Amino acid sequence: MGSPDETASLVDDTGAEIGAAPRHEVRRDNLLHAATAVLVRHPDGRIYVSRRAADKDWSPSAHDAAAGGIVQHGEPVEQSACRELAEELGIEGAPLRFLITGRYDDDTVRCFLHCFETTYDGVVTHADGEVVWGEWMTLPRLGRLLMDSDWPFVPDTRTLLERLCRSGIGDYASLGLPAAD
């Protein structure tokens, strides 16, 4: 799990690194930082959905369809994505495909998100305690769950999936999410 003292990569509006700050300051002051998200897909098309640990510093106990997190200062984003994938789901050596980048902002987090996808059919292990549960889901099932406002799901990945769905990237349109207002 990320240490509150790890040094995060601060970025500008284009995602270019402009500095660094300890993770606890990034969270406390809602600083714009680089982050990664890796969507893990089974060869049959299902996506891995997990639930975060109750002691996470952001969105505790919420579901997520991405492994990822804060990019450390000076760390290349693809290296960060591989590190997070190994830490959270025990997946190492799986090739990443870049999907999209974009900014996410709310009252609790501001990040420039770098999204990747990988295909994996091995054993998933919740290696570092950040994830406490997971299962493979079809995209239509995940889409139905995402439309339930009572189902706790991390907001940045929800926005990412909505964007992938609306943009017609890959097969994410099969999430069936409504268009943004």
Image: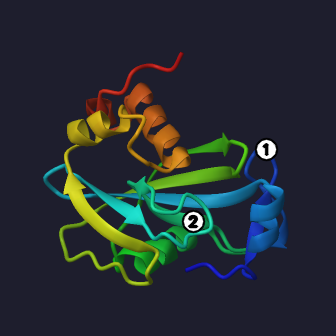
Residue sitting at 65 percent across and 68 percent down?
Answer: 71
Quickly name the residue at label 1: 13
* Quarter-of-image position of residue 149: top left
Per the image, label 1 sits on a secondary structure element best described as loop
Q: Amino acid at mark 2?
A: Gly
Query: Reading the chain from its start, which is encountered first: label 2 or label 1?
Result: 1
Question: The C terminus appears in which quarter of the rendering?
Answer: top right
* The image quarter in which residue 121 lies: bottom left
Near-viewer residue (105 or 103): 105
Q: Residue at x 69, y 52 (%)?
A: 109
- The residue that disc 2 covers is 69
Between residue 155 and residue 89, name the one nearer to us. 155
The kind of secondary structure element at disc 2 is: strand
Residue 13 visible from this viewpoint: yes
For the question of whether residue 171 can be seen, the reply is no
Residue for point 74% across, 71% down: 8
**Position of residue 76 in the picture relative to residue 173 (left or right):** right
Q: Give coordinates of residue 83: x percent, y percent.
A: 50, 77
